[in-house]
Image (tube, rainbow, N blue to C red):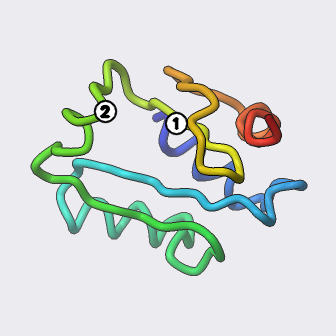
Amino acid sequence: EFCHAEAQQLQQKPTNAENIQWVLVSYAAQDSLNKFAETYDLYSMSGLFVLMDKEMTLYEHLQVKSIPTSYIYNRHHNLVTVKQGAAKLENLIQLTKR
């Protein structure tokens, strides 16, 4: 449910997001992930990458405690904050400006 809400927000091409790279990671099965990405036309979005982590390696490495979790990095590749739970894309975009 949260993933669908965030994907819908990405479809609307939020303002001030043209220099942001989005990396969406899921542990869903490949066919389910492809269907989701195609539903929201994610594969054609510039600066957006959809990755499958079926072994949940990244989840374990980052110690993800809830889904969704957003890791916000600034333009210098420094971690700014970790946001657990659903978030408005506008708020996430503002965090990248730090």
Image position of 54 (left or right of 24): left
Three-letter amino acid code of the residue under disc 2: Leu
Residue at (51, 21) in percent of width and height: 85
Image position of 83 (left or right of 46): left
Q: Position of residue 42 (x, y in %)?
A: 54, 69
Identify the image quadrant of residue 33. bottom left
- Does residue 39 lie above or below 85 as drawn? below
- Measured in 3D between alpha carbons, the distance from the residue under mark 2 to the one under mark 1, in whole angstroms, is 9 Å
Image position of 56 (left or right of 74): left
Q: Position of residue 70 (x, y in %)?
A: 52, 35
Q: Position of residue 89 (x, y in %)?
A: 72, 40
Q: Position of residue 8 (x, y in %)?
A: 64, 51
Three-letter amino acid code of the residue under disc 1: Tyr
How many tags in the picture?
Answer: 2
Extreme residue toward the left, this view = 55
Label 2 residue SS: helix
Residue under label 2: 62
| Mark 2 neighbour class, 10 Å CA radius: few under 14, some 14 to 19, many 20 or more | few
Res 71 label:
1
Residue at (60, 26) in percent of width and height: 81
Residue at (37, 51) in percent of width and height: 25
